[in-house]
C-alpha cells in the first residue's frame, strides 16, 4: 500500500467501509451473473485502494461494477457505499467506460464542466471556480491547449483523457472503470496506465478497475481480485506480492523482478480459476 496526501478532502462516513457487498446475488432471468458475493473494502483515512478485477469472460465483472454504480440492483443481498445502501447512481461514485463517453456537442472544457453545472445545487461553485477546476484537470490529464476542441477532433486516447477529467471533476471518492483502455493502441494504453496511476496517487480515490490483462492488473492495482467462471465469486484476493507503481513507467516496472513475480503469481491463480471453475477456493489470498 502506498500513501499520499490527497488533493481533496474525502467525505467518508466515519468508520464505514468504502464498499461492502453482503451476500449479493444477481440474476438476469435464468442467468445467475453473481452468486453470494461478499467482500469489504475498508476505509483508511486519506488512502484510496486501487483494486483491479480480472476473470473469465461473462463471470460478472461488469455486473459487479454496475452494482456499486447503482445501475444494477441485487436480486439478493445488499451493496453499501460508504455505509449507505446503494439504491441508484450517485455523485460519490464515478464510472468510466471502455467506449468514449464524452458529449460530442460540447468542447473539452464544456465536457469537463458539465457535471459540475448539473450538480451546482450541491457543489455551489461559481462559474470561475468551475472553469478553474476544469482547467486544472485538463492540465493534469495532458490536454492543455485542447480545451476548445470537440471530441471528434481528438484521438481515442485524448477522448479517454476527457472522460477521466470529466469524471474526476466531481471528485468522487469511488471510481469505477470497465476496461477503460482496451480500445486503445498499445503505446497509448501504456501512457494512460501511467497517467491513471499518477492521478490515483495524487487524489486517492478508491478505484475498482476491470481489465482482461494480468500485466495491466498488476501495474494499476495494489490489490487484484480474480473472479471465478460465472456465476461469479471472488476466488482470489492478491495483495502482498503486488509492487507499487507510482512514478514508474509501465515498461520500466515490467522489467523488475518483483513485478514479474507478481505477474507469475496472478497468472497462476487465474489459470487455477480457469481449470477448476467453481471448485476454486474462495477468498483465499495466494502466497505472494
Ligand atoms: P463480464 O463483465 O465478466 O464479462 P457480465 O457482468 O457482463 O460479465 O455478465 C455476467 C453474466 O450476466 C453473463 O452471462 C451475461 O450474459 C449476463 N448479463 C449481464 N447483463 C445482463 C443483462 N442486462 N441482461 C441479461 N443478462 C445479462
Image (cartoon, rainbow, N blue to C red):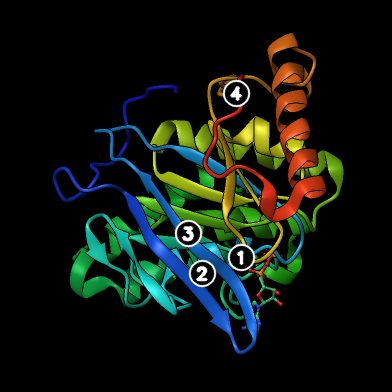
Q: Position of residue 53 (x, y in %)?
A: 61, 48
In terms of secondary structure, where does tag 1 sit?
A: helix
**Distance from Cα at disc 3 to Cα at disc 2:** 14 Å
The residue positioned 44% from the left and 61% from the top of the image is: 94
Classify residue 199 as left or right of residue 48.
right
The quadrant of the rendering that contains the C terminus is top right
Instruction: Tell whether circle 4 marks a residue whose Cβ is less than 8 angstroms from ligand 1.
Output: no
Crowding around mark 3 (Cα neighbors within 10 Å: few <14, some 14 to 19, many 20+) is: some
Compared with 201, 79 (above or below) is below
Residue at image mark 2: 66
Q: Which numbered disc, 1 or 4, marks the residue that appears first in the sequence?
A: 1
Residue at image mark 3: 37
Instruction: Tell whether circle 1 marks a residue whose Cβ is less than 8 angstroms from ligand 1.
Output: yes
Residue 242 disc label: 4
Near-viewer residue (11 or 37): 37
Crowding around mark 2 (Cα neighbors within 10 Å: few <14, some 14 to 19, many 20+) is: some
Instruction: Tell whether circle 2 marks a residue whose Cβ is less than 8 angstroms from ligand 1.
Output: yes
In terms of secondary structure, where does tag 2 sit?
A: helix
Amino acid at each position: 500500500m502506498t500513501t499520499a496526501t490527497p488533493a481533496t478532502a474525502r467525505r467518508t462516513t466515519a468508520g464505514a467501509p468504502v464498499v461492502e457487498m453482503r451476500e449479493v446475488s444477481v440474476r438476469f432471468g435464468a442467468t445467475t451473473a453473481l452468486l453470494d458475493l461478499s467482500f469489504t473494502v475498508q476505509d483508511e483515512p486519506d488512502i484510496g485502494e486501487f483494486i483491479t478485477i480480472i476473470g473469465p469472460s461473462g463471470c460478472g465483472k461488469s455486473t459487479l461494477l454496475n452494482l456499486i454504480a447503482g445501475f444494477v440492483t441485487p436480486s439478493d443481498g445488499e451493496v453499501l457505499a460508504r455505509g449507505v445502501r446503494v439504491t441508484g447512481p450517485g455523485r460519490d461514485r464515478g464510472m468510466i467506460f471502455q467506449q468514449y463517453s464524452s458529449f460530442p456537442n460540447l468542447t473539452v472544457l464544456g465536457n469537463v464542466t458539465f457535471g459540475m453545472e448539473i450538480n451546482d445545487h450541491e457543489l455551489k461553485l461559481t462559474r470561475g471556480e468551475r472553469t478553474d477546476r476544469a482547467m486544472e484537470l485538463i492540465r493534469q490529464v495532458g490536454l492543455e491547449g485542447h480545451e476548445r476542441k470537440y471530441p471528434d477532433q481528438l484521438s481515442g486516447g485524448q477522448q479517454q483523457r476527457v472522460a477521466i477529467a470529466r469524471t474526476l471533476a466531481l471528485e468522487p471518492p469511488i471510481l469505477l472503470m470497465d476496461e477503460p483502455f482496451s480500445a486503445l493502441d498499445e503505446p497509448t494504453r501504456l501512457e494512460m496506465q501511467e497517467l491513471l496511476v499518477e492521478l490515483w496517487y495524487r487524489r486517492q480515490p478508491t478505484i475498482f478497475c476491470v481489465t482482461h490483462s494480468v500485466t495491466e492488473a498488476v501495474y494499476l492495482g495494489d490489490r487484484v481480485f480474480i473472479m471465478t467462471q460465472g456465476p461469479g465469486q471472488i476466488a482470489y484476493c492478491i495483495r502482498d506480492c503486488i509492487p507499487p507503481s507510482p512514478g514508474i513507467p509501465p515498461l520500466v516496472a515490467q522489467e523488475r523482478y518483483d513485478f514479474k513475480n507478481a505477474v507469475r503469481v496472478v497468472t497462476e491463480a487465474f489459470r487455477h480459476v480457469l481449470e477448476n471453475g467453481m471448485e476454486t477456493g474462495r477468498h483465499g489470498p495466494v502466497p505472494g
